[in-house]
Image (spheres, rainbow, N blue to C red):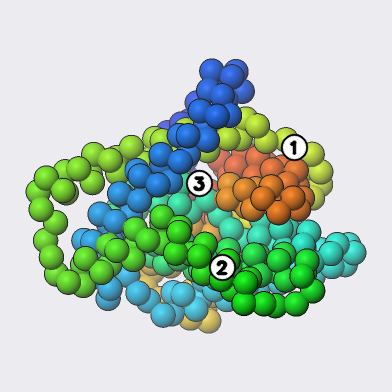
């Protein structure tokens, strides 16, 4: 446990450094926004493309992994939805809370950290988790919020969802990388070096950006944020573990990686969506802030458990 904690400390220390820079205004909100854009559109995309281009589709695609992760995530999504409805929340607020309960920071925190802790073999399972989050649940929240406002489903909603997926650089980078791999084209030396250098900026840049963005988050509605943090850090890895170990069993290494990915704190893009649609942004903000702070301990506990049990 102590060894795993010490291995995760540098990642959270970078987040802490970013938080200090944002809190002291050494890094303004505008600077944070531009750093996030650089990581999202360039550094992280380069890292994902390079990883995907060096993997075959057989190494990445795992139907049982998708089913197990999807089952566990949908189960916790359902729990959060039921609790929200019992509290008399409308569909829009319920969708934001359910999203906070299951969508972790896989892109900015999960891929860099889990690739270092478990090795590059972890990238395939993590990319599948990221793909399910982006394709299924990021689409679902747009459908629920937009549909509840319009009072019906329409082609324009589906068009919005489709364009959102096509324009997402992480989806594009993974897809292009797998296509490159399928065509069996070796990456030329200069191109590989370029991608390696640019991709190397993803880990420190993403972690620093997470911290700097947290500096502007508030801790309002603490009780709700604690409940959503419990769902994300406790229930989500638990039910994903049931999914990938019992209902749709997969190999121990992939199971360890997927359960660890499920233990990550609430993703920052939930706040972006909440702010974009003007639905409970403070609630999402508090859940991101508290879950990230708590995850300094809980992520280490989960990784230590899966490492001792399956590796």
Q: Give the residue displayed 23% in from the left and 61% down from the top.
A: 53
Query: CA separation, marks 1 and 2?
Result: 30 Å
Which residue is at a point 44% across and 74% down the rendered structure image?
Answer: 65
x, y (%) of residue 76? 67, 68
SS at badge 3: helix
Seen in the picture, residue 93 relative to 61 is either above or below; the reply is above
The residue singled out by tag 2 in the image is: 161
Residue 246 on image: x %, y %: 52, 79
The numbered disc on residue 300 is 3
Q: Give how far across and how far down residue 112 sits, in percent.
A: 38, 46
> What is the CA distance from the residue labelled 3 to the residue labelled 2?
35 Å
Residues marked 1 and 2 touching at CB (< 8 Å): no
The residue lying toward the viewer, choosing from 263 and 62, is 62
Dot 1 crowding, Cα within 10 Å, few <14, some 14–19, many 20+: some
Residue at disc 1, secondary structure: loop
Residue with the mark numbered 1: 219
Residues under labels 1 and 3: Cα distance?
A: 23 Å
- Toward the front, the furthest residue is 156
Frontmost of labels 1 and 3 is 1
14 vs 80, left or right, is: left
Q: Badges 3 and 2: C-beta atoms under 8 Å apart?
A: no
Quadrant housing residue 250: bottom left
């Amino acid at each position: 446990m102590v060894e795993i904690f010490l291995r995760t400390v540098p990642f959270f220390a970078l987040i802490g450094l970013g938080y200090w820079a944002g809190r002291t205004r050494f890094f303004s909100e505008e600077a944070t926004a531009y750093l996030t854009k650089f990581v999202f559109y360039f550094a992280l995309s380069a890292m994902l493309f390079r990883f995907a281009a060096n993997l075959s589709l057989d190494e990445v695609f795992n139907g049982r992994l998708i089913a197990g992760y999807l089952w566990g995530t949908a189960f916790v999504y359902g729990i959060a939805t039921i609790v929200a409805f019992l509290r008399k929340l409308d569909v829009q607020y319920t969708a934001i809370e359910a999203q906070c309960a299951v969508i972790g920071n896989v892109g900015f925190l999960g891929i860099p950290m889990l690739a270092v802790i478990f090795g590059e073999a972890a990238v395939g399972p993590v990319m599948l988790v990221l793909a399910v989050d982006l394709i299924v649940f990021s689409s679902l929240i747009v459908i629920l919020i937009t549909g509840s406002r319009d009072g019906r489903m329409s082609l324009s909603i589906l068009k919005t969802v489709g364009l959102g997926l096509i324009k997402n650089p992480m989806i594009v980078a993974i897809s292009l990388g797998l296509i490159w791999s399928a065509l069996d084209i070796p990456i030329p030396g200069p191109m590989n070096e370029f991608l390696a250098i640019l991709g190397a900026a993803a880990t420190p840049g993403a972690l620093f950006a997470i911290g700097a963005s947290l500096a502007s988050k508030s801790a309002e509605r603490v009780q709700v944020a604690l409940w959503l943090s419990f769902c994300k850090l406790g229930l989500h890895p638990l039910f994903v573990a049931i999914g990938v170990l019992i209902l749709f069993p997969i190999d121990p290494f992939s199971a360890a990686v997927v359960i660890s990915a499920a233990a990550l704190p609430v993703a920052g893009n939930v706040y972006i969506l909440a702010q974009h649609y003007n639905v409970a942004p403070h609630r999402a903000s508090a859940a991101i802030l508290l879950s990230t702070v708590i995850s300094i301990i809980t992520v280490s506990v989960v990784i230590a458990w899966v490492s001792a049990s399956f590796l």
